Amino acid sequence: MREARDASRSLRRFAKRGRIVPEENDPNIRELFIQSYRLIYRLRGNEVEIINFIHGARDLGAIVRKR
């Protein structure tokens, strides 16, 4: 999906553009919405780590609890 790739690449310059993930309540874990999907990423200093790319209908809370 081109839109997801473009969004992830934009994080190089605008890493804090996503909102804080409510299920995590950690300012370093953020998300961007891309159509029906959530691109979830973590800020680590000058790096951005993609954590997950899931459909918005999935229960992220259940996924987080499994970690």
Image (tube, rainbow, N blue to C red):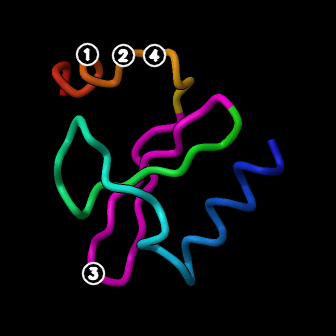
Rendered location of residue 56, percent (x, y)? 53, 25
Q: Disc 1 versus disc 3: distance between alpha carbons?
A: 27 Å
- Circle 2: residue type: Asp
Q: Disc 2 versus disc 3: distance between alpha carbons?
A: 28 Å
Q: Disc 3 versus disc 4: distance between alpha carbons?
A: 29 Å
Which numbered disc, 3 or 4, marks the residue closer to the eye?
4
The chief SS type of the magenta part is: strand
Rendered location of residue 41, percent (x, y)? 41, 54
Q: Which mark is residue 24?
A: none
- Circle 3: residue type: Gly
Element assignment for label 2:
loop
Q: Disc 1 versus disc 4: distance between alpha carbons?
A: 9 Å
Residue furthest to the right in view is 2
Element assignment for label 3:
loop
Q: Return the disc, 3 or 4, that comes first in the chain's sequence.
A: 3
Residue picked out by circle 1? 62
Q: Return the disc, 2 or 3, that comes first in the chain's sequence.
A: 3
Residue at the (60%, 33%) spot, across then down = 37
Q: Quadrant of residue 8?
A: bottom right
Residue picked out by circle 2? 59
CB-based contact (under 8 Å), mark 2 and mark 4: yes
Residue picked out by circle 4? 58
Residue picked out by circle 3? 45
Tell me which segment is drawn in magenta. Answer: 36-53
Report crowding for label 4: few under 14, some 14 to 19, many 20 or more residues within 10 A (C-alpha).
few
Report crowding for label 1: few under 14, some 14 to 19, many 20 or more residues within 10 A (C-alpha).
few
CB-based contact (under 8 Å), mark 1 and mark 2: yes
